[in-house]
Image (cartoon, helix red, strand yellow):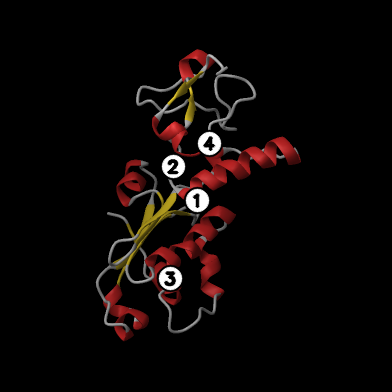
Amino acid sequence: MRHPTWQLVHRGAYALKREAAGIRADARGYITVDDFLETSVPGVYGLGDCNGRGAFTHTAYNDFEIVAANLLDGQDWKVSERLPGYALYTDPPLGRVGMTEAQARASRRPLLIGKWPMSKVGRAVEKAETLGFMKVAVDAQTQRILGATILCTGGDEAIHGLLDIMDANVPCTVFQRAAPIHPTVSELIPTLLAEMKPAT
């Protein structure tokens, strides 16, 4: 006999009837979770698309990593510590992490903004794919990267260099001593940062 909190849904799969289980949702229908991804019912966790905290394969997997690290390894990982990053597989692909320029400006902190056209990137020129740009917003006082956009050939891969620096919470000046591989899109990230100007 079927448990009363379960209902039959399409193609023979079963889904938990959220209301009957006492699991709360927000106004948009996403299951409400805390910083450790626990729902309103203790011991029940909401991972992946259901919680509205990313809706990407990589964020869903990271949800699993957070819950597993906390439950099995005694860690203290929080979903709020995750950097919002993603890629759109357009042509050219878009890589994004952190704040947009508009969000960084809205924070009212002093900013440095860098923008570099792909027409000045050797790898893009070699491939005859010069459409796009790289852009970064940096806190002028702490030298921490607040957000970046790379719209270009390989942008979905190149964004990881900036994401990693942000995740490590180190100043962008660490790029100054880098010896990047040529010819790549990523090799121009130190140049992008060196050419930043104060936001006006």
Badge 4 crowding class, 10 Å Cα cut-off, few under 14, some 14 to 19, many 20 or more, is many
Q: Secondary structure at mark 3?
A: helix
**Mark 4 or 3 closer to N-term?**
4
Callout 4 touching callout 2 (CB < 8 Å) = no
Mark pair 4, 1: CA separation: 12 Å
**Mark 2 or 3 closer to N-term?**
2
Mark pair 4, 3: CA separation: 34 Å
| Residue on which the image places disc 2 | 54
Mark pair 2, 1: CA separation: 9 Å
**Tag in front: 3 or 1:** 1
Callout 2 touching callout 1 (CB < 8 Å) = yes
| Residue on which the image places disc 3 | 189
**Tag in front: 4 or 3:** 4
Residue 12: x and y in percent read 45, 32
Q: Quadrant of residue 196?
A: bottom left
**Mark 4 or 1 closer to N-term?**
4
- What type is the residue that disc 4 sits on? Leu
Mark pair 3, 1: CA separation: 24 Å
Query: Looking at the rendered structure, which numbered label has been put on residue 47?
Result: 4
Above or below, comparing residue 2 to residue 65 in the picture: above
Badge 3 crowding class, 10 Å Cα cut-off, few under 14, some 14 to 19, many 20 or more, is many
- What type is the residue that disc 3 sits on? Ile
Question: Residue drawn 49% across and 39% down?
Answer: 48
| Residue on which the image places disc 1 | 58
Q: Quadrant of residue 177?
A: bottom right
**Mark 4 or 2 closer to N-term?**
4
